[in-house]
Amino acid sequence: MLDQLLEYDKELFLYLNNLGSESWDGLWLAITHEFTFAPLYAILLFLIYKKMGWKALLLMVFVIAAMITFTDQITNLFKHTIQRPRPCRAEGVMDLTRFIAPRCGKYGFFSGHSSNSMAAAIFAGLLLKPYYKNLIYLLLIWSLIVAYSRIYVGVHYPLDLLCGLTFGALAGFGFYKFNSYLLKRFISN
């Protein structure tokens, strides 16, 4: 059954990956680049400052750094434990893949881009929901676009993304709860 699931995953990857075209490659390479969304992160930090103040922002910078470090390290632990080759390195797949990424890491299960972007989306979306109720939906869409970019450039299978998004959502929620506790304990009067 696992073999069949992995076969479906490979087929779906090849279908989605091969939908790409040269005219869109630049856009998807920009979306998948890890620093493209630095302005978005700066805006989110500004909104946190504006609604919650300097003390809360300072505390959250440490919580956010811990969250991203956590999701990144757990992702790497899974990648090096499971050792599922990325599509751009997998026999029988790499020759059929539109590989446009600047590099191809060794292992891909599960996606760090997906887990980090979803953790950030859930954390910031829940944190700012009392002030901007629809922001979370925009952040979720952004995270899904970032995740899809990994298929487009040829470095992750759909299951890599699904597991990364799920793990990121759990991490984002967990760190949101941890942050809420810290705010009540150390910042609120």
Image (tube, grey):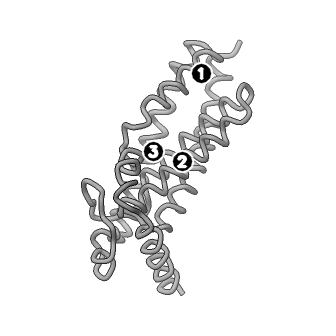
User: Which mark is drawn over residue 143?
Assistant: 2
Which one is in front, 105 or 185? 105
Q: Which mark is residue 175?
A: none
Is 36 in front, or is 184? 36
Q: Quadrant of the N terminus?
A: bottom right
Which is nearer the N-term, disc 3 or disc 2? 3
Please name the residue that numbered disc 1 is placed on: 47
Q: Quadrant of residue 187?
A: top right
Q: Earlier in the sequence, mark 2 or mark 1?
A: 1
Labelled pair 1, 3 in contact (Cβ < 8 Å)? no
First in sequence: mark 1 vs mark 3: 1
How far across and down, in percent of the image, does residue 16 sit? Answer: 47, 69
Left or right: residue 60 compared with residue 108: right
Give the mark toward the camera: 1 or 3.
1
x and y, in percent, of residue 101 in the image: 30, 56
Residue type at numbered disc 3:
Phe
